[in-house]
Image (cartoon, helix red, strand yellow):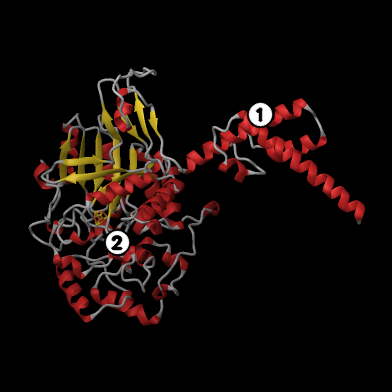
Amino acid sequence: MSSAHAGVLHVSLPDLKKDEVGSSEGDKPPNANGDEPPSHAKRHPAWLDVPQHFWNDWRWQIQHSIRTVHQLTELLPFTPDEIAALAKLQAEYKLAIPPYYFSLIDPNDPADPIRLQSVASPLELRGSAETEEDDPLDEDKDSPVKGLTHRYPDRCLIVTTHVCTMYCRFCTRKRATMKRGGWDAISRDDQRMIEYVQRHPEIHDVIVSGGDPLTLTIPKLKFFLEKLAAIDHVGVIRLGTRVPVTLPQRLYDNELIDLIARAEKIWIQTHFNHPRELTPEAVYVCRKLLRAGCQLNNHAVLLKGVNDSVATMRELCRGLLRAKVRPYYLFHCDPVTGAGHFRTSVWKGLEIIEGLRGHISGLGVPTYVVDAPRGGGKIPLMPNYLVSASDEAVILRNYEGMLIRYNPDGHTSPATSALETQGVSALLTGQREVLMPEGTPRMIRRHAIAVAERESAVVSEVLAAGKTPAAASLAKRNGQTNGTNGSVRRNGHLASRSPANESAESIARRLASELKRHKVARSNGRRQKTAV
Ligand code: SF4
């Protein structure tokens, strides 16, 4: 750490109780079998001098997290008005950003997506009580036991801690996690939550959340995981955590990984919102969790300025797939107090799904959901792929805009109508099977394949008719295609500008005239050689 910041960044742990800091011995970064974590993480200049073993130590990261406005002002530029607003926010909400996560911020960009998620903003004070709420999902009203929400038939949520490694400024549960005096003051009855699950055989799936359950001590986490894993009717335990994103060093601890692996029923729900969060460190701990037998699914939140573009979401989803983390949900940002500036329109979410579905592997397309107010729960939204319908058929749209008549009962020959019509109506009456947009990359590829196949067939005929060297040479020039993907090796430009329905006669005429040109060119060449 540079000496300029050393005094500022050594802080105590005001937001962590003893049993939530973690106390296991042997929490060392893995170093056996060459199993080293990546060691060249990006660092803010303030921490350039910190020895690698400290940087890799999650306890060092927590102890040096940015927790005050004063610390923030030493690391990022703010105007006096902004500082005054942040001081006001600090009185109400906690702040915590581990040096690792803070180092992902571009300090010169006030709109940096990592900064927007983690650094308090004066915009949080501009909320409206009419449109924003502390408990926008009415979780507390569906809570038969303090800390447990039972809303869906076969699953429930248990909040195991109010502590997070980083407090996301848009957090839906900020009343419990970030708010000073929020759930700090409430003692959850952990035993009663477990007993509730034991008494309700209809619960098959328990979401262990928070706060972040991976901030719990090993004994406390063990209590939850072992008790839940021992309940026969519980088949799935989902651990909701942002630790792989904000403090991957916590998962360098093999004791924690072993505990997760032993519980067997565990699925991990990560929370990556931006492709820049997929650092080598984050990918490394995802791999560790995969090796421990956990399935990894990602919940992203759609956030204005952070990931509200098709390009960013494509990059995020592809990056997640590469890390073998399945993009599972894209949540519309909830109307929680102080997070209004993060909210986009629902149309933005649909636009993003339109830019993902069909364009990238289905494995990489999350379900876009609105968590409905008044406890309505998660409601999926997607662009409309069902365009119209009749008694016999439905008209479907694919990602390219191709409209196709589909007979759900499997009849391949549609009924025809005497009425002459066009467009979607013609699809419904069975006069057309498909309306295909022109000029899409796929259609151009198809045309090239069709033309190449026709040319290949005609060249074979020419060769069969008279095997002259000139014909063979022409065949070589015109006829060689790549049989697997259909692309024309030598004259792709010729194939792609030729109509796919060019008749065999026309192709034969074209080839004959090329053959003639070829012969003339050869005899001219001979004459020139003779003259020389
Ligand atoms: S990690 Fe999760 S619970 Fe914690 S502040 Fe972020 S969104 Fe909220």
Q: Position of residue 444 (x, y in %)?
A: 51, 41
- From the image, which quarter does the N terminus lie in? bottom left
Q: Position of residue 156 (x, y in %)?
A: 20, 39
The number of numbered discs placed on residues in the rendered structure image is 2
> Label 2: few (<14), some or many (≥20) within 10 Å?
some
Q: Earlier in the sequence, mark 1 or mark 2?
A: 2
Q: Residue at horizontal 30%, vertical 19%?
A: 418
Query: Picture quarter containing residue 490?
Result: top right
Q: Which residue is mark 1?
A: 457
Contact, mark 1 vs mark 2 (Cβ under 8 Å): no
**Residue 299 visible, this orientation:** no
Kindly report the distance in space between the C-alpha atoms of the residues bearing marks 1 and 2.
Answer: 55 Å
Counting from the top left corner in percent of width and height, residue 78 is at: 27, 77
Which element is circle 2 on?
loop
Callout 1 secondary element: helix
Residue denoted by label 2:
305
In the picture provided, is 463 more to the left or to the right than 431?
A: right
Along the horizontal axis of the image, is 82 left or right of 404?
left
- Asked where in the image residue 290 lies, by quadrant, the reply is top left
